[in-house]
Image: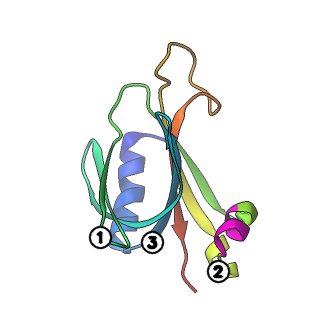
């Protein structure tokens, strides 16, 4: 998925005021579920606001960053862990894989990643 396609997807979430569930592992810091919405999208950065007003910016311009998009699908493990309804189980998602801090080939196993999952309200 190209940077332009990522911006189009994120801008769609911004325009629709979509609620996202964000999970990830970055440089030793993991988070299980942040509910948030997109507040802005630039050429290099995604702005998010959490439901309690916290602000997060994610820089996606680092060379070697990869993007993976998944069509709507059921997320049974995510749903059971976080109590999602049947309508919320259907979600599109975007995974951002940042290059590993140590030299080597980028794989999902060694990448630092953030996954944005659209939560569809009933």
Q: How many marks?
A: 3
Q: Earlier in the sequence, mark 2 or mark 1?
A: 1
Tell me what residue is drawn at x 33 percent, y 71 percent. Answer: 15
Residue 65: quadrant of the picture? top left
Mark 1 packing: few (<14 Cα in 10 Å), some, or many (20+)?
few
**CA gap, disc 1 and disc 3:** 13 Å
Query: From this viewpoint, is residue 71 visible?
Result: yes
Q: Secondary structure at mark 3?
A: strand
Q: Answer above or below: position of 96 versus 55.
A: above
Q: Earlier in the sequence, mark 1 or mark 3?
A: 3
Q: Answer above or below: position of 101 versus 96.
A: above
Q: Earlier in the sequence, mark 3 or mark 2?
A: 3
| Residue 2: percent from left, percent from top | 43, 40
Q: Which residue is mark 3?
A: 19
Q: Which residue is mark 1?
A: 53
Confirm whether the magenta stretch covers residue 85.
no
**CA gap, disc 3 and disc 2:** 13 Å
The residue furthest front is 28
Tell me what residue is drawn at x 25 percent, y 44 percent. Answer: 43
Magenta stretch, residue numbers = 78-83
| Residue 55: percent from left, percent from top | 28, 60
**Left or right of residue 103: residue 71:** right
Q: Which residue is mark 2?
A: 87
Whether label 1 touches label 3, CB < 8 Å? no
The residue furthest top is 103
Tell me what residue is drawn at x 35 percent, y 30 percent. Answer: 62
| Residue 89: percent from left, percent from top | 66, 72
Whether label 2 touches label 1, CB < 8 Å? no
**Left or right of residue 56: residue 121:** right
**CA gap, disc 2 and disc 1:** 25 Å
**Left or right of residue 46: residue 92:** right
The secondary structure that dominates the magenta segment is helix
């Amino acid at each position: 998925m190209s940077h332009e396609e990522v911006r189009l997807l994120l801008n769609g979430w911004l325009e629709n005021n979509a609620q996202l569930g964000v999970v990830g592992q970055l440089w030793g810091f993991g988070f299980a579920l942040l509910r948030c919405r997109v507040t802005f999208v630039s050429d290099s950065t995604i702005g998010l606001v959490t439901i309690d007003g916290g602000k997060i910016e994610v820089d996606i311009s680092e060379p070697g960053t990869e993007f993976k998009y998944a069509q709507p699908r059921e997320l049974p493990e995510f749903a059971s862990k976080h109590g999602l309804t049947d309508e919320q189980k259907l979600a599109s998602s975007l995974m951002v894989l940042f290059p590993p801090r140590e030299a080597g080939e980028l794989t999902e196993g060694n990448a630092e990643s953030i996954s944005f999952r659209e939560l569809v309200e009933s």
